[in-house]
Amino acid sequence: MTRPMDRTTLKGGDTVLHARTTLVLYHRDGAMVAQLDKGRPLVVGRSAPADVEIPDPGLSRQHARFTWDDHGIWVEDLQSTNGTRKNGERVSHARIAPGDEIAIGPVMVTVHVISSIDEELRGFDGHDRFVAALGDEIVRARTFGRPLALLMVRAASAKDGHVSRWASRLRMALRPVDRVGIYGPAAVLVSLPEATPEAVHAVADQLSGGDPPLVCGAVSFPADGSSVEELIAALQVATRAGRAPEPADPVAMVVKNPAMKEVMATVKRLAHSTVAVLIHGETGTGKEVVARAIHDGGPRRKQPLRCINCAAIPGMLIESVLFGHEQGAFTGADKSARGIFEQADGGTVLLDEIGELAAPAQAALLRVLETKRVTRVGGEKEIEVDVRVLAATHRDLETMVAAGRFRQDLLYRLNTVALHIPPLRERVDEIRPLAERFLKEARRQAGSDVRTIDPRAVAALESYGWPGNVRELRNVIDRAVVLAEGQAITPADLTERVRGGARSLAAEAEPADELGDYKEHVRRYEAELILRALHKHNGNQTEAARSLNLPLRTLVHKIQTYGIKKKFER
């Protein structure tokens, strides 16, 4: 005997089979899904005892209560500071339904009543989680030689194009394996693994236009970048391609740090020589900017500078890209083409990520450096080239030589003079001027009113370890300009990783009339101090203990007590 099918009827609406009410909450660090059960209130706020905690300083600790009863779905404002709105009107208690735009402070909420046969609603990742997942996808794509694309989808008008208005439309265009991360109130990032260029273009075409109008930009790994920061930076350029921005300031390095002053003094001397230079530094430190400074400061400045990322070119094509090919040399070679060396004749070639070259390409490059002649793929004629070669890498090439993965004779040719670019975490005095410069550029490109960086945000920037270096800093500022609601970038506009964890931010923003337990506040303050010290010293506990004037054993004990290891990200 079969049981009768459960039916739940919402007053004034149609009968829904196995109805479930779900809230999707869009906040600056992602979008989360919360199920609303009939007869059980759901409180949303900044911190406990709220049922759904969103650590946004624009929320009160207990901001709003959602309920579902026989008369419908309701939202009640809990005397919050920034209020609750339904379709733009401030309310204290109101009935809501799917299609209404609910705002509790800065958080947008949409209501979904779905049946068991509907596809599960999924939240969007916060920016930090998305970036971490994208990093994993890049490793997978690199390891197995598989395609990976990154899409930015944003509303043409941020004013009335909040993500909540077109999230369902976005999901319908994507596959279950595609991942979405919140970039700003009106923009998301989408990773598309195993997607062909045709499939990526099809998704972009499907999403472009519409109501509200959307704009899409797409980049691919490794052609447009080989790291998370490179891909996001390339995506910024791609999404601006349709605009007519004001010209940016000429490229110039911010040089405040003594180590960087020494590097640039060496650059000035090297610019007038012809020796090969190997530029070593972590990803995102500005190796290409240093190479450009060498080129622009020397006698070849009026000739071409050609930059090639060796990690971004498939192994079977690298020799064609470097040295050119003749018509019919391989499938798809419909006509002859000059390589990078021919294009840069009389000028300079920068071989970025030189450590990624495969053995055959290393041998061919060595031959060109020795003979100053190139032979196109599929050709026999030697073509003389006059090129100064600069190389850059983040790898330890001497270790690679010892392991048999890089030619020693090629290293000798490239490493006449070595330049080491210190990471940004060792150039703390340059973080603020760099951030202010990136803010100026982002404001001009976005047409934003954001003009300054709050001192607390500057402190957070200077305390962070910057594993992605200058490129990551630029990406963080670009995103902060999108998020900022006033004329200054605040800590809340930075990524959670940079601002040192949402828990300490929420504690800092807690109003004076919600002081709570004294011991709890002391605990939070102490944990925040330890977090800041760890970030400042890039996770080095010995240095952090010294800066806090604590015995190392005491610091280790407190880290374990507060569970900081789980929250701190190096």
Image (spheres, rainbow, N blue to C red):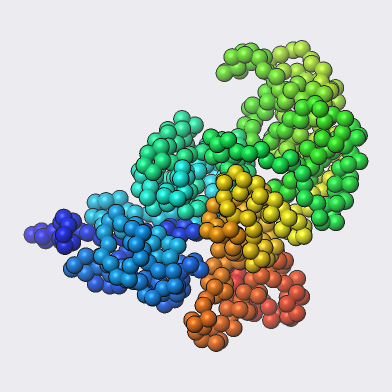
The image position of residue 92, as x and y in percent, is: 32, 71
Q: Check the image and report above or below for 291 versus 439.
A: above
Give percent across and percent down for residue 188: 48, 48
Q: Nearer the viewer, residue 96 or 20?
A: 96
Find the residue positioned furthest to the bottom. Answer: 518
Instruction: Relative to 138, say whether 464 is above or below.
Output: below
Which residue reaches farthest left?
Answer: 1
Residue 96 higher or lower than 423, as above or below: below
Q: What residue appears at the point 64 percent right and 58 percent down from the top-left corner? A: 452
Q: 540 or 167, which is in the foreground? A: 167
Q: Determine if residue 120 is in view.
A: yes
> Horizontal and vertical percent for residue 78?
37, 75
Q: Residue at x 47, y 57 (%)?
A: 30
In this rendering, would 143 be left or right of 462? Answer: left
Image quarter of the N terminus: bottom left
- Total numbered labels placed on residues in the image: 0
Asked if one can make out residue 464 in the rendered structure from this viewpoint, the answer is no
Relative depth, front residue between 143 and 42: 42
Observer-nearest residue: 212 or 476?
212
Seen at 34% across and 54% down, the residue is 121
Q: Quadrant of residue 82?
A: bottom left
Q: Quadrant of residue 236?
A: top right
Q: Is residue 107 left or right of residue 388?
A: left
When the figure is inspected, residue 252 is found, relative to residue 44, above or below; the finding is: above
Q: Which residue is depicted at the point 67% across and 63% down?
A: 458
The quadrant of the rendering that contains the C terminus is: bottom right
Task: Give residue 366's position: percent from left, percent from top.
Answer: 81, 29
Relative side of 182 to 210, left or right: right
